[in-house]
Image: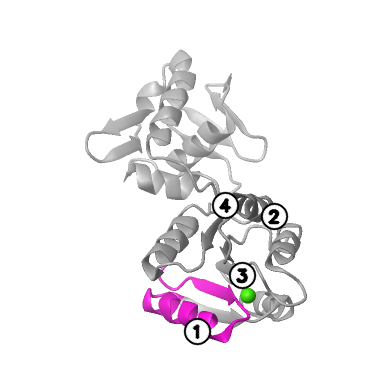
């Protein structure tokens, strides 16, 4: 994600400049817009990886723009961090309800902002491929969300399904909890690392009746791996 493109939508030139400076210092590419209209132009032309969106914009507000972005199939998956000058709880809730992934209140420290950007980018889930995966006696069918072990169906929750899918597609490699969060979880801002352990336990429990829980191995001090050995 070194050269991720960050679109800064901010009408105050000094703040826009400051944001662009910090974004570029952190190794990202900064795109700029001063209102909703120029934001759409940038989104169409440059396909940003994340949008820093000011709450108060002329004409169309940041909240309205966030809602528009979320209701458009082409833009609904772009993570949004809302910038707000107000700190009231009510506004934060409104911002998150409008579809923002996170919010940050002005004035903010550049370090905090960069940490939020990295966290949101990290949790923005890449799409898994649609091909059927087979490994260790298991077959996983992404299109129908089915997993079978020697023709017996294994019942899995959606997160366990994604987790198993990722493991099977990357067998024999060890992944830390942080890496698994990056690869498997949704754009949820408040997921803790121990959540991974909970879902690993559920996944093993689901595989146990087929005698296949041993496929999910704990690598002490490192994380987890799917291994047929
Ligand atoms: Ca503003």
Q: Which of 136 and 199 is in front in this view?
A: 199
- Give the image location of residue 95, x and y in percent: 64, 56
Residue shown at the point (37%, 28%) measured from the top left: 215
Asked if marks 4 and 2 touch (Cβ < 8 Å), the reply is no
Per the image, the residue denoted by label 2 is 98
Q: Which of marks 1 and 3 is nearer the N terminus?
A: 1
Tell me, yes or no, if residue 111 can be seen here: yes
Nearer the observer, disc 1 or disc 4?
A: 1
Per the image, the residue denoted by label 1 is 17
Asked if marks 1 and 2 touch (Cβ < 8 Å), the reply is no
Left or right: residue 93 versus residue 37 is left
- Most extreme residue toward the top, as rendered? 209
- Give the image location of residue 195, x and y in percent: 43, 34
The image quadrant where one finds the N terminus is bottom left
Q: Which of marks 2 and 3 is nearer the N terminus?
A: 3
**Label 4: element kind:** loop
Asked if marks 1 and 4 touch (Cβ < 8 Å), the reply is no
The quarter of the picture where residue 66 lies is: bottom right
The number of discs equals: 4
Q: How far apart are marks 4 and 3 (CA)?
A: 28 Å
Q: Nearer the viewer, residue 35 or 107?
A: 107
Nearer the observer, disc 4 or disc 2?
A: 2
Q: Does the residue labelled 3 lie within 8 Å of ligand 1?
A: yes
The quarter of the picture where residue 84 lies is: bottom right
Q: Residue 54 carries which label?
A: 3
Residue shown at the point (48%, 35%) measured from the top left: 164
Residue shown at the point (37%, 78%) measured from the top left: 25
Q: In the image, which residues are magenta?
A: 1-28
* Crowdedness near tag 3: few (<14), some (14–19) or many (≥20) residues, C-alpha within 10 Å: many
* Crowdedness near tag 2: few (<14), some (14–19) or many (≥20) residues, C-alpha within 10 Å: some
Q: Earlier in the sequence, mark 4 or mark 2?
A: 2
């Amino acid at each position: 994600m070194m050269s991720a493109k960050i679109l800064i939508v901010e009408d105050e030139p000094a703040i826009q400049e400051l944001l662009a400076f910090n974004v570029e210092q952190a190794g990202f590419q900064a795109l700029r817009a001063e209102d909703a209209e120029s934001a759409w132009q940038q989104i169409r032309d440059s396909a940003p990886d994340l949008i820093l969106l000011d709450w108060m914009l002329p004409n169309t507000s940041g909240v309205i723009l966030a809602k528009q972005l979320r209701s458009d199939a082409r833009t609904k998956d772009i993570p949004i961090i809302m910038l707000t000058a107000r700190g009231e709880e009510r506004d934060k809730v409104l911002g998150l309800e409008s579809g923002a992934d996170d919010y940050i209140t002005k004035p903010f420290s550049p370090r905090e902002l960069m940490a939020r950007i990295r966290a949101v980018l990290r949790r923005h889930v890449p799409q898994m491929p649609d091909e059927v995966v087979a490994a260790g006696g298991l077959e996983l069918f992404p299109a129908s969300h089915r997993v079978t072990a020697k023709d017996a169906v294994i019942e899995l929750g959606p997160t366990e399904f994604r987790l198993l899918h990722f493991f099977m597609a990357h067998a024999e490699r060890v992944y830390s909890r942080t890496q698994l969060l990056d690869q498997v979880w949704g754009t949820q801002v408040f997921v803790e690392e121990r959540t991974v352990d909970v879902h690993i336990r559920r996944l093993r429990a689901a595989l146990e009746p087929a005698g296949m829980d041993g496929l999910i191995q704990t690598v002490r001090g490192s994380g987890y791996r799917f291994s047929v050995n």
